[in-house]
Image (cartoon, helix red, strand yellow):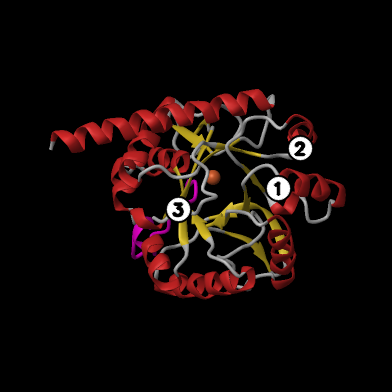
């Protein structure tokens, strides 16, 4: 992966509205910040503050309303509004989800799963081309947190993501916590999943907290739910270290969207990501030297 001069070398945190004024006023030592554009598009005051923030931090735009998996197509008006914000704050990265979240113009408050087959691959290829043309820059696609699969799928998620990269030139956002959570819920090996992703295409890593809940479909079993409401689990930190060794260091972000704590808690998690990544890199260097 080539890195631009603006590529951050420290972990960042998701910037949510409750912390926006504090970030403007105190300029905390975050490596970079990621925003959801949908929080700002109808909020001129917040956008003004965000423009101020953009003068002091590398920013990333993580869309939650660009539904690349919808059969009814991309909402071009929404995409234009995102483009206008992107042009204003000039982020280092723009990303979204391998999911669908709109139907016949209605926005659903969820990221819904897709089968991985040729028909869906063709649909998403066309939509990612459209998004990248609309934004005038590459788009990063994030692996989902999974709770169900489709018997009609003809390829694995990693094969599907790899084909999207090959056909569109898009890049990937590997949410390491999603990999761990999905591996638990769906019964696969998370380390093998990391091995099977195309390393050169990984442009960003996410880490977020998840919650354990009783699995109503399978009494006695637990389901991990992608709540973004807690610190990162130890098992996800271990997988993150492995991902850094496999992909090399990548811009890493701490996501926290519910029960949002003090900003200092997010910054502590980001500092832990820096420590884990540095240790993983030095271990990998020692291993390479020994070979
Ligand atoms: Fe994520």
Name the residue carrying label 3.
3
> In the structure shown, which secondary structural element does the residue marked by tag 3 occupy?
loop
| Crowding at mark 2 (Cα within 10 Å: few <14, some 14-19, many 20+) | some
Name the residue carrying label 2.
20
User: Is residue 101 or residue 175 the one in the foreground?
Assistant: 175
State whether residue 215 appears in this view: no
Please say if the residues under marks 2 and 1 sit with CB atoms less than 8 Å apart.
Answer: no
Residue that appears at 33% across and 37% down: 242
The mark that comes first in sequence, 2 or 3, is 3
Q: CA distance from mark 1 to mark 3?
A: 19 Å
> In the structure shown, which secondary structural element does the residue marked by tag 2 occupy?
helix
Name the residue carrying label 1.
54
21 relative position to 250: left or right: right
Percent across and percent down for residue 54 are: 70, 47
Q: CA distance from mark 2 to mark 1?
A: 12 Å
Q: CA distance from mark 2 to mark 3?
A: 28 Å
Residue most extreme to the front: 5
The mark that comes first in sequence, 2 or 1, is 2
Residue 161 in the image: above or below residue 286: below
Residue 174 in the image: above or below residue 245: below
Residue most extreme to the right: 45
């Amino acid at each position: 992966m080539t890195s631009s001069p603006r590529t951050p070398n420290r972990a960042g945190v998701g910037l949510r509205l409750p912390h926006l004024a504090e970030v403007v006023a105190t300029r905390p030592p975050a490596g970079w910040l990621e925003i959801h554009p949908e929080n700002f598009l109808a909020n001129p005051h917040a956008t003004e503050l965000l423009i101020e923030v953009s003068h002091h931090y590398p920013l990333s735009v993580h869309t939650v309303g660009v539904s690349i998996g919808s059969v009814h197509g991309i909402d071009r008006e929404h995409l234009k509004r995102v483009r206008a914000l992107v042009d204003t704050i000039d982020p280092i990265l723009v990303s979204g989800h391998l999911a669908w979240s709109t139907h016949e113009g209605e926005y659903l408050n969820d990221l819904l799963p897709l089968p991985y087959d040729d028909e869906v691959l063709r649909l998403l290829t066309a939509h990612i081309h459209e998004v990248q043309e609309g934004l005038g820059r590459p788009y990063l696609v994030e692996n989902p947190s999974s709770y169900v699969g489709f018997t009609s799928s003809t390829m694995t998620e990693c094969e599907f993501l790899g084909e999207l990269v090959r056909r569109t030139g898009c890049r990937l956002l590997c949410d390491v916590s999603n990999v761990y959570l999905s591996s638990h819920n769906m019964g696969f090996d998370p380390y093998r999943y990391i091995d099977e992703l195309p390393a050169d295409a990984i442009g960003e890593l996410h880490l977020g907290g998840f919650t354990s809940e009783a699995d109503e479909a399978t009494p006695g079993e637990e389901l991990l739910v992608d709540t973004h409401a807690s610190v990162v689990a130890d098992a996800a930190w271990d997988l993150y270290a492995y991902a850094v060794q496999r992909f090399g260091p990548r811009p890493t972000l701490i996501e926290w969207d519910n029960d949002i704590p003090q900003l200092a808690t997010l910054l502590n998690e980001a500092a832990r990501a820096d420590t884990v990544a540095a240790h993983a890199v030095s271990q990998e260097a020692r291993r390479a030297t020994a070979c």
